[in-house]
Amino acid sequence: AIRPIVPGEEVLLSYWPDIDSSDAQSRGMYEGFGMSCSSVGGAPEFEFSAEQLAELAALKGAPAAVASRLAAVGAGSDVAVAFDESAAALSATISKAEGVLPKSLRAFLEPRFFQAQLTLQQGAILTARGDADRGSQLQKLAVKQIRSALHILEGAWGKRVLLRLLFAFKGALRPSPAMMMAVGSGEVGEGGAEDFSINLAKQARISPEDVRSELERAVQEVFGDELLMPAVLSKCGIAE
């Protein structure tokens, strides 16, 4: 706290697990909650050039764009083609951003998880169409993508990482609320205000055992005890 808390005083705690410090600062969230940026700490984004900031914005907007594109796929469309095109577009965005931004930047977390989840869905489609070998290969690749996305991060993991893992366990492509914040601040129109997730096939999920060590670390950093992992999974309706 930035001041002493009087015994018995009511305290409001708030967090934005998928919102970067630069987003919070630019949208006045610190001031809105009576906080100062100095009390929270710095962020590498504060020192970026105009070119880097443009790439950062494109990177952060990519997951919501992918989810919106998939949500718009109509009946009778080739779902496999839609996922292949979405995966290719997202991979291109990530690769371009990696050429300009630090690869350990936390803003890569959500896009890289989306990339892995799209890979899982592609594998599930191949398996359903009789190509079990390639489907299995893509599933293994997706697990490697998730583990790589986590291990390249610098600093504490916290709720942001745990949420991404839980979404992957449940097979949900869930964009962060960053786009909704942009709508609220007038940066984009109301058309970007959707708050939704795309449900993937049951076969397009990873299991907690696939990333057990990473899950234990995430639970440890959020709740202070990795032994709470079974309780966390149970509370979220996920089989261990």
Image (cartoon, rainbow, N blue to C red):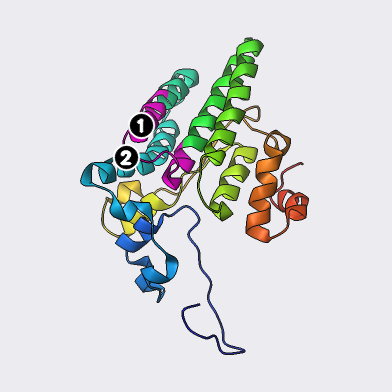
**CB of mark 2 within 8 Å of CB of mark 1?**
yes
Residue 101 is covered by the magenta coloring: yes
Q: Which residue is mark 2?
A: 58
Q: Which residue is mark 1?
A: 93
The answer to whether residue 96 is left or right of residue 238 is left
Q: Position of residue 175 (x, y in %)?
A: 46, 44
Residue type marked 1: Thr
Residue type marked 2: Ala
- The kind of secondary structure element at disc 2 is helix
Residue 147 is covered by the magenta coloring: no
Q: What segment is highlighted magenta in the picture?
A: 88-111
**Up-down: is 55 above or below 10?**
above
**Up-down: is 161 above or below 206?**
below
Picture quadrant of residue 35: bottom left
Disc 2 versus disc 1: distance between alpha carbons?
7 Å
> Which residue does the image show at 38% across and 70% down from the upper left?
38
